[in-house]
Amino acid sequence: MVARVQAEPFDLSAEMAGFGAGAGAVVTFTGVVRDDGGDLAALEIEHYPGMTEAALRDHGLTAAARFGLSDWRIVHRYGRIPVGGQIMMVATAARHRRAAFDGADFLMDWLKSRAPFWKREIARDGSASWVAARAADEDALSRW
Amino acid sequence: MTVEVLYFAWMRERVGHPRETVRTDAATPRALIAQLAALSEGHAAAFADGAVVRCAVDQVLTDLDAPLGQPREVAFFPPMTGG
């Protein structure tokens, strides 16, 4: 039961060492910076120190209660992350597969539109633009 | 009362600084926005589209029309884009 916000990359195998001991199902998700348009150099992620950590922890606890997770972990990076770099990870552990998948999916939908992070795209020519919130992310949250 | 007001993302850029201390009698975040928007052109630009303004009062997401109470810290920011 860990929520962490950090600038440096994370080591997925180190994060998962000892995670969810005794569970029947462990799900991990890693978000990676992708370049859809062919001219993205990096993302720059801003957060709200203090609130972000508390919000991640609150939501991890909510997911654990709702889906019966025996363990969970959220690691989200901030600062400049190049294309191909890790943005964040979510891991969930439960007795059965469905709860682990649903818990991870729920946490991801929440992170997309309710966790205090803001992304800015840095293009190869150095220009920067803030990423607008997507209605699809809001819709995804409403299904829970 | 005196509150610490924080701005994030493009709202911070438009205001021109990440935080400021403000004296206010505002009863709701929306009333505080009206006061802040009058401070400068940058503030007005940050708050120009009220539909995209999100607010946290003492680090808890709060509706713009909820009672403000006596907070230590109020933050304004655009819709979040994590994950």
Image (spheres, rainbow, N blue to C red):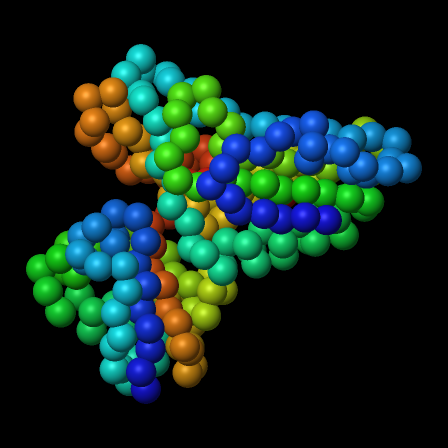
Q: Position of residue B58 (x, y in %)?
A: 45, 70
Taking the view exactly as shown, the residue that stands out farthest to the top is A38
At 25% across and 82% down in the image, what residue appears?
B23
Residue drawn at (76%, 52%), measured in percent from left and top?
A65
- Residue closest to the far left: B41
Say above or below: A108 vs B46. above
Residue at horizontal 17%, vertical 61%? B43
The C terminus of chain A is located in which quarter?
top right
Question: Residue B58 versus residue B55: which sits nearer the camera?
Answer: B58
On screen, B52 above or below B64?
A: above
- Taking the image as shown, residue A40 lies to the left or right of residue B58, namely left
Decide if residue B32 is in sight here: yes
For residue A57, which quarter of the picture? bottom right
- As drawn, A56 above or below A24: below
Image point 32% across, 53% down: which residue? B8
Percent position of residue A86, x then y = 51, 28
